[in-house]
Amino acid sequence: MNDALRMVLSKELVILDGDGTLYIGSRPLPGAREFIRFLDDHGKRFVIMTNNSSFSKDHHIKRLRRILRRDFSSNEVFVSTEAAIEYLVEHRIRRVYALGTPEFIQDLMRLGIIHDIENPELVVIAFDKTLTYGKLVNAVRHIMAGVPYIVVNPDMLCPTDKGYIPDAGSIWALIRAATGKEPIAITGKPSKLFLNYMLRKLNVKPTEVVIIGDRLYTDIAMANENGIDSILVLTGETKAEDLINARYRPTFVINTLNDLLK
């Protein structure tokens, strides 16, 4: 048994990233199904923690079932949207203007948060695959008028079957360039808010966790900033050469999830 797998088996909870770690688009990445089966066979508790706020949680669960050929409960899948909602509820914010997909906005409205185009208390920048110039104009005007904003997730790119597409971080970059203003919070990975929300629900301590993901500035950053062991998988956005001068350092680096099972 290799050292990385030994570490995984020593932990109470395995946190797995989705896009770029377990799958890209609609296809599983090498070793993904086999690793999930291995965790199940060994009775190892795990969750999938995704920053992809373009889909609802129900959509993610159904998608994971198709890709990984396993049923998932609501406590095995956590989406950055949940952390954003936790932030809004905690700060008693009821009216927002959101750059987000209809699924994202419906998730907000289900919890009583109003999508207010004219007079929001806060602007919310999510992964909006339905983005239009008109939406950007509205967001910029609100922010320039003094309305604060948050970013749901900072990922610059999202991998798909046809290649990378701009994610919420790229939309944020445009908003920041246009307004010259910074967000008051980022709620998805690597935010401690997202991590604490999930660990509270699962009753697990950070020292009992390992994070496995493909991004240095989200997955590995979350691990480093919270004293958590981590494994970087080179099947997504991060390449081996990115590690040379990297700010964030994983405990182990592997090419694919198959490497854990060798």
Image (spheres, rainbow, N blue to C red):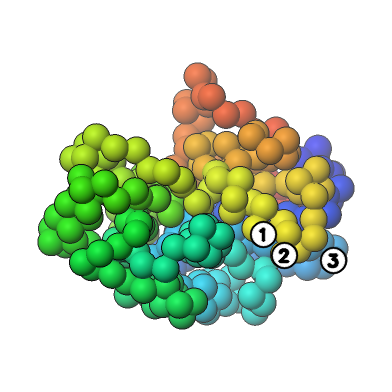
Mark 3 touches mark 1? (CB < 8 Å) = no
**On the image, numbered disc 3 is attached to which residue?**
43
Disc 3 is placed on an element classified as loop
Taking depth in this image into account, of 237 and 195 the one nearest to the observer is 195
Taking depth in this image into account, of 97 and 26 the one nearest to the observer is 97
Mark 2 touches mark 1? (CB < 8 Å) = yes
Between disc 3 and disc 1, the foreground one is 1
In this picture, is 209 found above or below 201?
Answer: above
10 Å crowding of disc 3: few (<14), some (14-19), many (20+): few
> What residue appears at the point 50 percent right and 51 percent down from the top-left corner?
187
**Residue 105 placed where, x, y %?**
36, 72
| Alpha carbon distance from label 3 to label 1 | 20 Å
**On the image, numbered disc 2 is attached to which residue?**
201
> What residue appears at the point 51 percent right and 52 percent down from the top-left corner?
188
> What residue appears at the point 32 percent right and 71 percent down from the top-left corner?
115
Q: Earlier in the sequence, mark 3 or mark 1?
A: 3
Q: Which label sits on residue 96?
A: none
**Residue 87 placed where, x, y %?**
52, 57
Q: Is any part of residue 101 visible from this angle?
A: no
Q: Earlier in the sequence, mark 2 or mark 3?
A: 3
In this picture, is 192 found above or below 72?
Answer: above
Q: Could you tell whether 132 is left or right of 78 in the image?
A: left
10 Å crowding of disc 1: few (<14), some (14-19), many (20+): many
- Please state which amino acid type lies under the numbered disc 3: Gly
Disc 1 is placed on an element classified as helix
Q: Which label sits on residue 198?
A: 1
In this picture, is 77 found above or below 205?
Answer: below
